[in-house]
């Protein structure tokens, strides 16, 4: 397996946020993580990405890709762009540590912009772009390094519903055409069933994996009317499974 999470637990002081998390993600697989607010989803993503050491347990990443310029990439909800750099320069920033000629660098950046529909905006500054376009820049920057592992933390949550729908369709195509191992954290159950191969449901804090849902419809077929009906059923089953704990978690957070 490309990503193996083995009995990971984590505490912030006396606060236990994750408890005994174990799962694997194969090459080319997308695993979405959903659960109540405060259940440790983003904390786990930081542990997988090496930004945070777990209190116990371990994460192993198996990188068999030879053409990766950086095996791991993040896409965040807040875009994380450098406001003084152009779109092309923001994408190129992720490649500064690589030993690339100018022509190689320009070719990689152009390819990433082409894949995300940003070629015509290469010289624009982030402030000149809509939220959806800025998130495309974040995605292009991640794709430019040809990652083996892509970690996505609520990447569409800051967008309006129309922009989210458009970008979700683009993400479906991009992910279906890759061999990346993807962990996708989201509160949005529609995103989870539209984009993932499996959905991990976390309990309220301390987060534990309660169950996995398999999404058996291939991503390339999820746009059909029949598929959308079935995905809606899956989404309802997810909500039925998570509803009571999500409600209780919200009440607990309100009482803090």
Image (cartoon, rainbow, N blue to C red):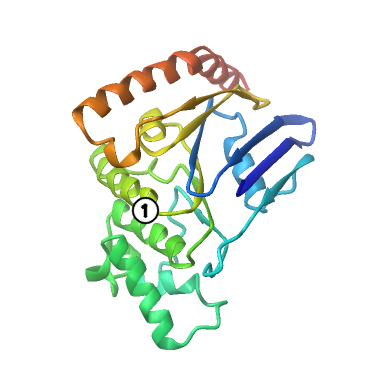
Provide the residue designation for mark 1: 177
Q: Is 139 on the left or on the right of 13, as rendered? A: left
194 to 112, vertically: above or below: above
Question: What residue sits 41% from the left and 59% below the top?
Answer: 138
Q: Is 26 on the left or on the right of 166, as rendered? A: right
Res 208 → quadrant: top right
How many numbered callouts?
1
Question: What residue sits 56% from the left and 14% below the top?
Answer: 248
Q: Is 164 on the left or on the right of 184, as rendered? A: left
Q: Is residue 60 visible?
A: yes
Along the line of sight, the residue nearer the viewer: 157 or 72: 72
73 to 170, vertically: above or below: below
Residue 173 at x, y percent in the picture: 31, 49
Residue 247 at x, y percent in the picture: 50, 15
Q: Is residue 160 visible?
A: no
Residue 20 at x, y percent in the picture: 73, 30
Question: What residue sits 45% from the left and 42% below the top?
Answer: 154
Residue 15 at x, y percent in the picture: 74, 30
Secondary structure, mark 1, is loop
16 to 121, vertically: above or below: above
Res 143 → quadrant: bottom left
């Amino acid at each position: 397996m490309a990503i193996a999470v083995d009995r990971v637990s984590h505490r912030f002081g006396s606060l236990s946020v994750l408890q005994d998390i174990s799962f694997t993600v194969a090459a080319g697989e997308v695993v979405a993580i959903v659960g109540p607010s405060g259940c440790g989803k983003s904390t786990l993503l930081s542990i997988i990405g090496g930004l945070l050491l777990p209190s116990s347990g371990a994460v192993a990443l198996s990188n068999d890709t030879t053409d990766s310029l950086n095996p791991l990439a993040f896409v965040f909800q807040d875009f994380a762009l450098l406001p003084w750099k152009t779109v092309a320069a923001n994408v190129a920033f992720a490649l500064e540590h690589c030993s690339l000629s100018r022509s190689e660098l320009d070719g990689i950046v152009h390819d990433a912009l082409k894949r995300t529909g940003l070629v015509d905006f290469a010289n624009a500054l982030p402030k000149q772009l809509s939220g959806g376009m800025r998130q495309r820049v974040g995605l292009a920057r991640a794709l430019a390094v040809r990652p083996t592992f892509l970690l996505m933390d609520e990447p569409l949550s800051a967008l309006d519903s129309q922009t989210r729908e458009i970008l979700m369709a683009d993400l479906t195509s991009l992910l279906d055409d890759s061999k990346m191992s993807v962990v996708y954290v989201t509160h949005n159950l529609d995103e989870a069933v539209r984009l993932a191969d499996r959905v991990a449901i976390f309990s309220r804090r301390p987060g534990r994996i309660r169950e996995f849902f398999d999404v058996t419809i291939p991503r390339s077929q999820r746009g059909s009317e029949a598929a959308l009906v079935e995905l809606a059923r899956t989404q309802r089953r997810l909500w039925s499974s998570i509803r009571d704990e999500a409600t209780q978690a919200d009440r607990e957070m309100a009482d803090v």
